[in-house]
């Protein structure tokens, strides 16, 4: 029985999607992806295909697919993307043109097809940030027209680095309960721990970017993507997008887990 790894972030929907694949004769692994362990498990499980549902958190699904292709141990596992907003799917196709794209009505046939065909030549994007190349920073961060954006503990050059904001968007310094989006900068694990309760409260109202210094930055601390992701998830949030802000800062976008259930 062929093994398929399903990637989905909503437990109930994942059960329904897994049932479609199981009824078609596949053994389905569908635990939510969690950090680096997910990729280590992929190498151990060696599924014949990976099915990524794009109906929820498509950016996260895309980034997981890029990371799969970046790892030698998982690079040649066929990837099947299912569903999703057509515009966002088209952008993913530009990044990973050799993956398979379909709807749930056709997924079983498509998965069987890619398993039988196998995969020889794969597209390996330069980095997980490749999808954001040439986009303005405000666009990469998801700042929309008319939105209110808060930034907390940001570096002095951040506001100018954003450049021109979308029409009607406003930028405020410090936590703001009415913000549609918050960018929260933390320079150390100690600071992240101290601010985490406030960050979680903020995520229950609107998405929050947690930004940390990149390795080699002048303000480099003891934070990494894994540390930030695990801290957020352990506090009840889920991340669904990544962004390279500039040469010094990276960020993950979090929301309260209840918002995607």
Image: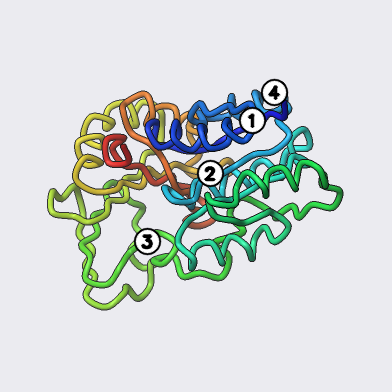
Circle 2 residue: 214
Task: Write the residue at 54% across / 51% down.
Answer: 105
Circle 1 residue: 39
Circle 3 residue: 142
Q: Position of residue 164 (x, y in %)?
A: 35, 76
N-term-proximal mark, 2 vs 3:
3
Q: Is residue 189 left or right of residue 182?
A: right
N-term-proximal mark, 1 vs 3:
1
Labels 2, 3: front one: 3
Q: CA distance from mark 1 to mark 3?
A: 27 Å
Q: Residues within 10 Å of mark 2 (few under 14, many from 20)?
A: many
The answer to which quarter of the image holds residue 170 is: bottom left
Task: Write the residue at 39% across / 66% down.
Answer: 138
Task: Write the residue at 67% across / 49% down.
Answer: 110
Circle 4 residue: 45
Task: Write the residue at 27% across / 54% down.
Answer: 181
Labels 2, 1: front one: 1
Q: Nearer the viewer, residue 187 or 136?
A: 136
Q: Residues within 10 Å of mark 4 (few under 14, many from 20)?
A: few
N-term-proximal mark, 4 vs 3:
4
N-term-proximal mark, 2 vs 1:
1
Labels 1, 4: front one: 4
């Amino acid at each position: 029985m062929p093994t398929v790894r399903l990637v989905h972030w909503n437990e109930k929907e994942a059960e329904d999607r897994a049932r479609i694949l199981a009824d078609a004769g596949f053994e389905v692994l569908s635990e939510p992806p969690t950090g680096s362990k997910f990729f280590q498990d992929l190498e151990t499980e060696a599924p014949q295909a990976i099915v990524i549902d794009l109906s929820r958190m498509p950016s996260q699904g895309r980034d997981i697919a890029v990371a799969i292709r970046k790892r030698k141990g998982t690079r040649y596992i066929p990837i099947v993307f299912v569903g999703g907003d057509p515009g966002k799917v088209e952008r993913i196709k530009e990044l990973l043109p050799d993956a398979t794209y379909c709807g749930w009505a056709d997924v079983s046939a498509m998965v069987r097809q890619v398993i039988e065909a196998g995969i020889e030549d794969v597209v390996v994007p330069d980095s997980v940030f490749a999808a954001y190349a040439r986009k303005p920073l405000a666009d990469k961060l998801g700042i929309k027209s008319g939105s209110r954006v808060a930034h907390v503990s940001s570096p002095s050059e951040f506001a100018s680095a954003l450049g021109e904001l979308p029409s009607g968007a406003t930028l405020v310094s410090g936590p703001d309960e009415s913000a549609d989006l918050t960018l929260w900068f933390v320079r150390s694990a100690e600071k992240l721990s101290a601010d985490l309760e406030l960050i979680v409260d903020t995520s229950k109202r609107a998405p929050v970017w947690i930004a940390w210094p990149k390795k080699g930055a002048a303000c480099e601390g003891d934070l990494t993507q894994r540390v930030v992701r695990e801290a957020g998830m352990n506090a009840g949030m889920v991340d669904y997008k990544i962004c390279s802000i500039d040469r010094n800062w990276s960020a993950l976008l979090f929301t309260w887990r209840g918002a995607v259930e």
